[in-house]
Amino acid sequence: MEEAAADLIRRAQAGDGDAFRELTEPYRRELQVHCYRMLGSFQDAEDTLQEALLAAWRGLGGFEGRASLRTWLYRITTNRCLNARRSASRRPAKQWDVPDVEPPEPTRIGEVVWLEPFPDALLEGAIDAPLGPAARYEQTEAISLAFVTALQILPPRQLAVLILRDVLGYQANEVAGMLGSSVESVKSALKRARAGLQHRRPTTDDRERSPVPDSAAEDAIVAKFLRAWESADLDALVALLTDDVFISMPPMPFEYEGRDVVARFCASIFHAGRRFDLVPTRANGQPAFGAYLRSPNGISHGTGLYVLTLTGARICAMTRFENTVLPSFGLPRSLPSR
């Protein structure tokens, strides 16, 4: 351990709050992302991270340096997340509440209604943190909505083991130490978690890769979607969709899969006379838009956030979240209609 870090630890253990903040601040964002992967909810991740840092502050006297400070913080944070998963009163599913819109029958009813988006503005310095040799996933893939959604179905301990091993790259013996478990138990949980994740995640082997973020190719798709949605041009919108396009709307459990039924869903919105202004942003490493419903008084009111999943030059998924997430993205509740 470097002498400067050792000095900070000594000062923090003596009750110096500023030293503790200096020690933990370099890890704060990656720990926040870790909480988000574990819990699927941005707000729950924020609350649990605060609890974990408070527990670390109170327990710093017991830190003996046998593992790195980063690993020690991950141990505390992971166990706080496990407690949150076990005791969470998850947000209940919400009934359809869009005025004057009669949607088609959903393809299925979604399970992960507590899912929330993660602002890209908070990913800087979080997903380029150093990974251990066991990591199997690119960090950008491991923050995507599809990946985070699939994680939420796993039992809590399997979820923790998979993230610590396959996403962060910790060795089995390190994970066993973090979870107070045996190496064999960790290996068994990882095997089951991998099988469960493979079963839950959509098959993407035959899909084109998504365009590079903020590239000309991505910008072109985003611009076409924006024009089609703002002008309620159903034909232009449908032309952007893959055959197996998927729409979900947490906390409403309605899910639609397939171009035809998604087209009918979008038509039900456009035919009700609802017109929108869209404000670009980014969530989970993906293009996103704050959606604002135009009104006769010249004000557009925020109704939600759309996050797009791209493959090649097409849209293969769209997730719609409620307007309560807009402040997390620095977006206003309303704006002048264009």
Image: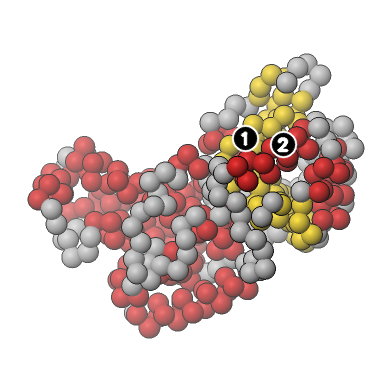
Give the amino acid at mark 2: Leu
Q: Residues within 10 Å of mark 2 (few under 14, many from 20)?
A: some
Judge by depth and name the residue closer to the eye, 102 or 144: 144
Q: Is residue 321 visible?
A: no
Judge by depth and name the residue closer to the eye, 237 or 299: 237
- Give me the C-alpha separation between circle 1 and circle 2: 9 Å
Rendered view: 73 above or below 18: below
SS for tag 1?
strand
Spot occupied by residue 296 in the image (x, y as percentages of width and height): 81, 19
- Residue 74 located left or right of residue 260: left
Rendered view: 98 above or below 197: above
> Which residue carries the number 1 mark?
280
> Which residue carries the number 2 mark?
226
Give the amino acid at mark 1: Pro
Pointers 1 and 2 in contact (CB under 8 A)? yes
Spot occupied by residue 4 in the image (x, y as percentages of width and height): 12, 47
Q: Earlier in the sequence, mark 1 or mark 2?
A: 2
- Indicate which disc residue 304 carries: none
Q: Is residue 294 visible?
A: yes
Rendered view: 55 above or below 204: above
